Amino acid sequence: MSTPSTPQSPGSASVPSSAPVWVVVGASGFIGSSVHAALTARGARVRSVAAPRLRTDATDARALASVAAGLVSERKALTEAFANAEVVINAAGLATPGAGDSPELRGANALLPLLIADAADAAGVRRFVHLSSAAVQGHRPFLDESSHVEPFSAYSRAKALGEQALAVRQSGPCSVVTVRATSVQGPGRPTTAKLARLAASPLASVAAPGTAPSPVSSVHALVDFVLTVAGHMGPVPPVVLQPWEQASVSSVLESAGGRRPVRLPAWFCRGVLRTGYAVSSLAGERFHGPLRRVEMMWFGQRQEPGWAEATGNVPEPRVQHVLESSRS
């Protein structure tokens, strides 16, 4: 297990001026605020930096790099904000899986991480951790840490574009790592409250036999993993996947709703999804987001072991507790 370079004593009254500075971009959001709170509890010196509002018409990595190169004043402002920082964590972006494509969506989820990486290099930051989404791998039978992506919506395409832009940029002294977060749940998150309501309703169902692994995860485990990746003093792969928390499609619904879900024939579920996606495609992907949530509820998605498992850096699973606490 690696040892992060942050102090580990919660509630520390004072932080030495020589302690490393950790920057959190997007600290006001759901995940960013959790990262900021965890760092503060560990006694770290934390600096919150607001993300600049960006927009772009670029739709490929090379074009995106050209746009980023022209953002001189924005890069300078971020470089100054990252001064003397050891680690920068980007938790900013537009978390809108059901949104349509827009310059703002691509600016927040694709252009911003590239600009932050360039600024981190210029500021002499040791490691930059970018929060991406496992949604970039779409409908694949399994999630892994490869560069293979199959985005299926505007949101996942923007996230995939951000990953691709980071992969092709000319690397500098700063270690750049992308963390693919899975289906993160936590207290106060609207998606978690919706999941709890669905799980408690007669609509709660799984594709038989209901034992498929689910990538539903807890914000606590994600934050622990992000801080481990950020503080790891050795090399880390360019892309790492948030580890599986041992949940199945049935256990997720049972924990969130307090009742056993209905088991539907797998052939029936596949037929419904095929028809639904076909109709949604004709309607400009309008229903892709809800259909994907149903697909994940029924079939889940397997996760391949990666860097965390190989190095003993798997955080304690907390998803069952989070889901049980979400019941109204």
Image: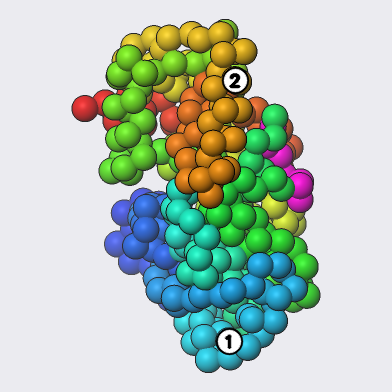
Which callout, 1 or 2, points at the residue further toward the start of the chain? Answer: 1
265 vs 218, nearest the viewer: 265
On residue 71, which mark appears? 1
Residue positioned 64% across, 73% down in the render = 58
**Range of residues picked out in magenta:** 142-148
- The quarter of the image holding the N terminus is top right
Residue 10: percent from left, percent from top: 36, 51
Quarter of the image for residue 142 reads top right
Residue positioned 64% across, 41% down in the render = 138
Q: Residue furthest bottom?
A: 73
Callout 2: SS: helix
292 vs 240, nearest the viewer: 292
In the rendered view, how is the structure colored?
rainbow
The answer to if 88 sits in the magenta stretch is no
On residue 271, which mark appears? 2
Is 154 on the left or on the right of 176, as rendered? left
Residue 84 in view here: yes
Residue positioned 52% across, 86% down in the render = 74
Q: Residue furthest front?
A: 282
How many C-alpha atoms fall within 10 Å of the one at disc 2: few (<14), some, or many (≥20)? few
Callout 1: SS: loop
How many C-alpha atoms fall within 10 Å of the one at disc 1: few (<14), some, or many (≥20)? few
Residue 234: percent from left, percent from top: 72, 56
310 vs 5: above or below: above
Residue positioned 31% across, 54% down in the render = 11
